[in-house]
């Protein structure tokens, strides 16, 4: 085995992150070294790892906001799961904090002083991902000029975070499953297995169940990974976190920008609470950062908050399949959009919509509509008369 082992690039490898600083991500700085051009692009896509040069001065390792009851329940679950050695699957939409939670799981585990290695599975081509994960021997393939330790070995005794696990090619999924079962890796071009002790935390922003059904993800690997799973709610479903997160980001960016105290005015608070946050916590962070850059007299007003009008449209899920979100989640989403539109007489409009939909569903039968909605026939009749859908004379 080679004398000249090459470790994974130190700027994309994060050892002992107890002093994680999540605002120090500088992709440009990650690319400053002598990497071959073909690989530079790949590394630019890697996870938002902190700049290692900043780590020594960073003091914040555990500063997270969990105030809404939904987040507190999640936090409790993390605390239960983290100390074990079980593999963890973190599921959440973009910007919900998957990477932060993965790091937190590591920090709360007995591995906290050991390596935390993070890698984005979607950032590598199929041919590269195998040698990145498992390493290779010198001469294993054309261009393998020296022995290279893979991510698993680099994470030995610590935690390996595989982001976007759904992007892993099927051929690699088989190998990953074997590594998890056997607890050893074989570098490309080697015969001898190397024992490893790694806890895997995988993340996905897609429903892996659907990928399994579509034949893109191995079912056996799916069950192996989801031994412990953490579902991260969207920001709009944990509204109690919105203002605490806003204050948290204000204090961070204020410090970084060298500003004194910053206040949010009442209209600004209302606007933050009304938004549907399709980009979740990351979007909120960006909105606050931007607001601090443009606000005047240390006061953030509603007009300083530039919220996206783009809604991340997702294909409509079939409620009946049980896949994806539940009916209440969809209803909540729809309501948030309406709150945001700022429509007058929203309550009346909602009531009207419910009555019309139910009357339609019941083939214009008022008695059945009342039964369906669990209200009296008189109420339904009165509303239908008001809407001009039936005559008062009947
Ligand atoms: N509970 C929290 N408290 C404070 N900041 C948070 C919290 N959760 C996430 N953040 C911050 O929000 C941003 C997005 O988090 P993170 O990168 O972990 O999300 P993600 O789900 O991995 O996003 P993506 O899918 O886009 O990769 C980061 O700056 C992170 O530090
Ligand atoms: Mg991420």
Image (tube, grey):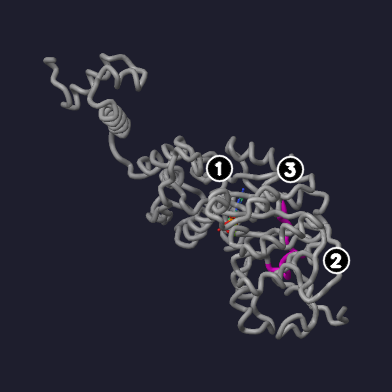
* Residue 81: assigned label: 3
Observer-side mark, 2 or 1, equals 2
Tell me where residue 270 appears, x and y as whole percent.
Answer: 43, 42
Q: Which mark is first along the chain, 2 or 3?
A: 3
- Mark 1 near mark 3, Cβ–Cβ under 8 Å? no
Task: State the quadrant of the C terminus.
Answer: top left
Give the alpha-carbon distance from disc 2 to disc 1, as whole Å. 44 Å
Residue stretch in magenta? 51-62
Observer-side mark, 1 or 3, equals 3
Taking 278 as reference, is 379 above or below it?
above
Observer-side mark, 3 or 2, equals 2
Q: Nearer the viewer, residue 376 or 16?
A: 376
Is 52 within the magenta?
A: yes
Instruction: Identify the residue at horizontal 29%, vertical 19% (top origin).
Output: 368
Is residue 274 at all visible to an observer of this figure?
Answer: yes
SS class, disc 3: helix
Label 1 belongs to which residue?
A: 241
SS class, disc 1: helix
SS class, disc 2: strand
Is 58 within the magenta?
A: yes
- Mark 2 near mark 1, Cβ–Cβ under 8 Å? no
Instruction: Identify the residue at horizontal 69%, vertical 84% (top origin).
Output: 34
Task: Answer with the quadrant where ligand 1 appears in the image.
Answer: bottom right
Tell me where residue 235 appears, x and y as whole percent.
Answer: 52, 46
Give the alpha-carbon distance from disc 1 to disc 3, as whole Å. 22 Å
Q: Nearer the viewer, residue 230 or 207?
A: 207
Label 2 belongs to which residue?
A: 194
Q: Toward which corner of the image does residue 356 lie, by quadrant?
A: top left
Q: Nearer the viewer, residue 326 or 127?
A: 127
């Amino acid at each position: 085995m080679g004398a000249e082992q090459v470790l994974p690039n130190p700027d994309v490898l994060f050892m002992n992150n107890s002093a994680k600083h999540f605002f120090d991500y500088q992709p440009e700085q990650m690319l400053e070294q002598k990497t071959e051009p073909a690989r530079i692009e790949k590394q630019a896509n890697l996870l938002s790892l902190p700049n290692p040069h900043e780590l020594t001065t960073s003091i914040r390792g555990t500063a997270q906001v969990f105030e809404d009851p939904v987040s507190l329940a999640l936090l409790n679950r993390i605390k239960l799961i983290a100390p074990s050695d079980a593999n963890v699957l973190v599921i959440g939409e973009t910007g919900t904090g998957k990477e932060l939670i993965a790091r937190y799981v590591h920090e709360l585990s007995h591995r906290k002083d050991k390596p935390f290695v993070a890698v984005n599975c979607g950032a590598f081509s199929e041919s590269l991902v195998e040698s990145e994960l498992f390493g290779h021997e010198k001469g294993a393939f054309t261009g393998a000029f020296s022995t290279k330790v893979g991510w698993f070995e680099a994470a030995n005794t610590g935690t390996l975070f595989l982001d976007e696990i759904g992007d892993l090619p099927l051929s690699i999924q088989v190998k990953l499953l074997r590594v998890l079962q056997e607890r050893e890796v074989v570098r490309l071009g080697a015969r001898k297995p190397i024992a490893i002790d790694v806890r895997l935390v995988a993340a996905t922003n897609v429903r892996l169940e659907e990928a399994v059904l579509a034949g893109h993800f191995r079912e056996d690997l799916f069950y192996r990974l989801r031994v412990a799973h953490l579902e991260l709610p969207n920001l709009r479903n944990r509204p109690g976190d919105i203002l605490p997160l806003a204050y948290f980001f204000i204090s961070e960016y204020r410090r970084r920008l060298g500003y004194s105290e910053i206040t949010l005015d009442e209209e600004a608070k209302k606007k933050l609470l009304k938004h549907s946050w399709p980009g979740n916590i990351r979007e909120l962070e960006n909105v606050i950062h931007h607001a601090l850059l443009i606000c005047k007299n240390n006061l953030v007003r509603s007009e300083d908050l530039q919220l996206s009008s783009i809604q991340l449209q997702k294909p409509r899920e079939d409620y009946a399949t049980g896949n994806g979100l539940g009916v209440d989640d969809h209803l909540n989403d729809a309501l948030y959009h309406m709150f945001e539109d700022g429509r007058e007489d929203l309550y009346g409009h909602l009531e009207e919509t419910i009555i019309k939909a139910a009357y339609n569903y019941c083939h214009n039968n008022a008695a059945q509509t009342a039964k369906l909605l669990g209200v009296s026939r008189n109420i339904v009749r009165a509303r239908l008369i008001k809407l001009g859908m039936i005559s008062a004379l009947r």
